[in-house]
Every structure is written in C-alpha cells, then in structure tokens.
Image (cartoon, rainbow, N blue to C red):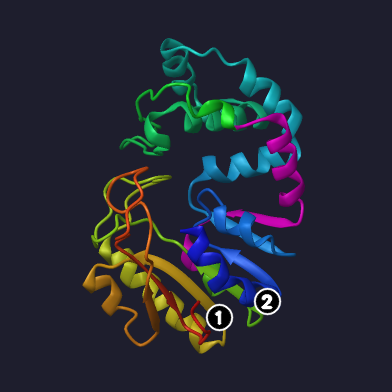
Amino acid sequence: MLDFLIPQLASSALTSNRFVEPFAGGGAVFFALNPKRALLSDINSELIDLYRGVRRYPIEVWNIFQGFPSTKDAYYKIRDWKHDELDLPTRTARTLYLNRTCFKGMWRHNGNGEFNVGYGGQDRRWVISKETLVWISKKLLRVSLKCCDFEEVIDACEEDDLVFVDPPYRPGECEMVHDHYRYGKFRFDDHKRLAATLGRASARGIRWAMTTSVHPDIVYLFHRYHIVSIPRGTGRKIGTLTKNSGEVLIRNYKEVFQ
C-alpha cells in the first residue's frame, strides 16, 4: 500500500509545516515520508510509550529486548507483567517483544485493558536490530508525541499542517471488532465523529488525507471529497496481500493521482 500512498502524499508533506497522524499505529507513512516536523498521536498509551522509549533509550531497549527468552512460556510470563509497574525502557522492550512474537502482530486488549493476544512464534522477532532502533530514535527526535483521542489532535491543528488519518477498521466493514494495534472499539459512531472533526478541519483550511474502509456507509460520510480506490492491500485477512484491498484514499484537496 505504501507504494501507492507515498506518491499521493509526498508533495503535500513537503509543502506543509507539520505532518500530523492522530492514529499513529506503526508509523509506516511517517517514516516513509520523513517530514521535517511531525506530531504522532494515538489513544493507546502503550504505543506512545513505545515511541517515547525508543526515542530516549534505544540501546537500553535493545539490550532488554534481545535478552528476553525465546520460548512460549516466557512470552506468557512477560505478557502478564503489569505495564504501569515497569520503567520506561522495560515497558518499551516488553511492548516491542509482544508485538514481534504475538500472533500475526495483532494488538488487542480484553475488557480490563490487558493485552491478550496469543503466542505466535519467534519468526518476526529478529527483523528488529540495534541499528534499527537507533535509526528510529534519530527519526523521532523531531517528533512531538501525544496520547489522546483523535478529535483533540485534529481540532488543535493549524492551517499549514497536513493531517494523515488511518482510523481502525476492517476493510469492507463499517464496524471494527478486531484489528492491528486495536485499543478499544472503533464503532460507526466514531467514524461519524471523525467525519465531523475532519469537516471542521476543512472549514479551517487544513489539508487532510485518509485511508479507510470502502464500506458504502463510511464512504458516504465523505462523499463530497476526493475519493479513489486503493488498488492493493491486506484486505480482510491479516498479513495477506490482495488486489482488492477494500480500502479507499480520501482527500479534501485536489492533487493529481498517479
């Protein structure tokens, strides 16, 4: 999907004062665009702590991460640790470890707010290296990080900002129940709240772009904007690429599509 998105966003990112992501997730678009100034935000405090920890303590995080055992039993013991009782480097290493060794990289919490995804193996773990964390740390030095709801972030944006929005959803559906980096449920009422928030941003002259589900009820919320289908993506199955992504790119400004 990045091969499609980046050419669509690059020129706008270059001419903006600040790149803003209210649903930071894995930050793939931010790292690919490499803007001079950015604000990354998410309602998931563990995710924002991950960014903060890597930015400040990349070597310490790596040393803890690579020292975790490579067994299923260790995974469940580390999963049971209380996030709030750990120092920042350990919290960061734990989140990174769970993300890289859980089932298909899913991030899901139970009703008590506890991470509850099962073990997925070690195959994805060693894609991460010390050099990777140091590189990410340097990229994050010019980034502001915030943990809050998307509405607060978008309402505080200014005219020269470019807002990129990638809300939680399952392609083709208007209700999201389980998804990557999930923290709470994102219902259709939240999509409507997002549409209203982006409408206020448009009225203030702020440029924004969004990837979202092709579900007609969601698309209709943004029917007055520029909409184009995303030709390739993961679709409904996590980790499986398909020619029919079930997703669209929506923008409130005109730009030639490649």
Which mark is on residue 16? Answer: 2
Q: What residue type is labelled 1?
A: Arg
Near-viewer residue (56 or 30) = 30
Decide whether residue 233 is among the magenta residues: no
Residue 157 in view in this figure: no
Decide whether residue 144 is among the magenta residues: yes
Q: What residue type is labelled 2?
A: Ser
> Magenta segment range?
128-151
Q: Residue 33: image x %, image y %? A: 64, 62
Near-viewer residue (223 or 198) = 223
Whole-angstrom CA distance, mark 2 to mark 1, is 9 Å
Which mark is on residue 207? Answer: 1
Q: Residue 62: image x %, image y %? A: 68, 26
Q: Residue 202: image x %, image y %? A: 49, 85
Q: Residue 134: image x %, image y %? A: 75, 38
- The secondary structure type at the circle numbered 1 is strand
Residue neighbourhood size for the residue with mark 2, other residues' Cα within 10 Å, grouped as few (<14), some (14–19), many (≥20): some
Near-viewer residue (235 or 93) = 235
**Residue pictured at 29% horizontal, 61% vertical:** 244
- Asked whether, in this view, residue 150 is left or right of residue 66, the answer is left
Which mark is on residue 193? Answer: none
Residue neighbourhood size for the residue with mark 1, other residues' Cα within 10 Å, grouped as few (<14), some (14–19), many (≥20): many
Against 82, residue 190 (above or below) is below
Against 223, residue 210 (above or below) is above
**Residue pictured at 70% horizontal, 56% vertical:** 143
Question: Which quadrant of the structure image shows residue 63?
Answer: top right
